[in-house]
Image (cartoon, helix red, strand yellow):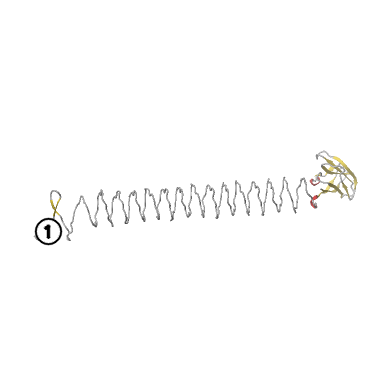
Amino acid sequence: MDPNQLQALIFGSDGTNALPINTDSTGRINIGAVNTVTAVLGATITAGTISATILGGTIAATVVAGTINAVEAATIFGGTINAVEAATIFGGTINAVEAATIFGGTINAVEAATIFGGTINAVEAATIFGGTINAVEAATIFGGTINAVEAATIFGGTINAVEAATIFGGTINAVEAATIFGGTINAVEAATIFGGTINAVEAATIFGGTINAVEAATIFGGTINAVEAATIFGGTINAVEAATIFGGTINAVEAATIFGGTINAVEAATIVGGTLSATILAGTITTISQNNYNQFSALGFVVDSTSFTEIPAASLMQNSYPYKVYSYLVYNNTPAVTVNARLEISSDGSRWIADQTITGLLTNGVVLTPYRFAKYTRVTLATAQTDTANVDVYLDAQV
């Protein structure tokens, strides 16, 4: 026998029978099926499948490729895993995960990771130091700092502090103890602002609440129910109703009606119309010019009765008590007809008493000044004969 052929004649025992141990053409032992391997030192498994249960010991191996169906209670200290499917990792640390999709389970801590896509159902007690989150739905963030949020909608919860943020849209239900340094708020409804400064408000409607101070503001419209202790430096107020102004200075008032109250001082004012029912308690009236004089007239009044008839012109039915001096001037424009004039006074405006009568007025005019004083005064006219006359009547009054 050739000694070189001994490589094919080496036998092993399975405990009962002697069996040949085969080798390949290079002399390497070719083992078929192995039930138990006590120790493997420096082995390389090129291909195939290992369906094994490792009960103990330490594997310091590098698996370059292939598929591992199941790993239980293992600790992987290094290397790279290309793909993990349907696995549950109970502990340890994963240095880097690229292009992975995690369908369930719990991740206790993620540090310095970048997640490019997918969906995270729940994150509890996490701190995210950087990166970008595209969408967060139904999340509650208990603490930490978010550097930037773009195009997000927050449906509920509480934000403790927002610094240097720009909110482009959406609705904020409540803001407490916040300071907004800039930007634009399109609409605020049912809000109470306790302090701070608002630089500019444009086209806003404030339905309620209290504004402590407004400086250099221009209000273009709307209604202010109450203003207390305010100073308005300029601008125009179109209408003020039922207001009480306690102090300050009003530069100009146009077309206003003041129903009551007290005006401490009026300087360089012009009162165009209306009635001043005032009581001057003290002070000095320097000049009373044209505004203390009034003239009323009824021109072209037709007299066609021999009974005294009042002139129905509203301008001549005056309350005479505000005037210190007043007279009626009667002009007969029909010289061929004699006109009689009588001055009457009354305290209630319904029962009249004759004060003085002028008869035989043919041409020119006559002045009627009452001898007695009453609250109301009027002039009545009649013709001396049955005929028609045309008369002009003036009332000149001075305070």
* Residue at the farthest front position: 57
Is residue 160 found left or right of 219 in the rendered image?
left
* Residue at the farthest top position: 351
Residue 367 visible at all:
yes
Front position in the image: 116 or 127: 127
* Type of amino acid under label 1: Leu
x then y, percent, for residue 62: 28, 56
Figure disc tally: 1
Front position in the image: 343 or 321: 321
**Where is 5 relative to 120, above or below?**
below
Q: Quadrant of the N terminus?
A: bottom left
Which SS class for mark 1?
Answer: helix
**Where is 39 relative to 378, above or below?**
below
Which residue is identified by label 1? 6
Front position in the image: 291 or 11: 11
Is residue 171 found left or right of 278 in the rendered image?
left
x then y, percent, for residue 94: 35, 53
x then y, percent, for residue 160: 50, 49
Q: Residue at x 12, y 58 (%)?
A: 6
Q: Residue at x 10, y 60 (%)?
A: 3
x then y, percent, for residue 211: 61, 48
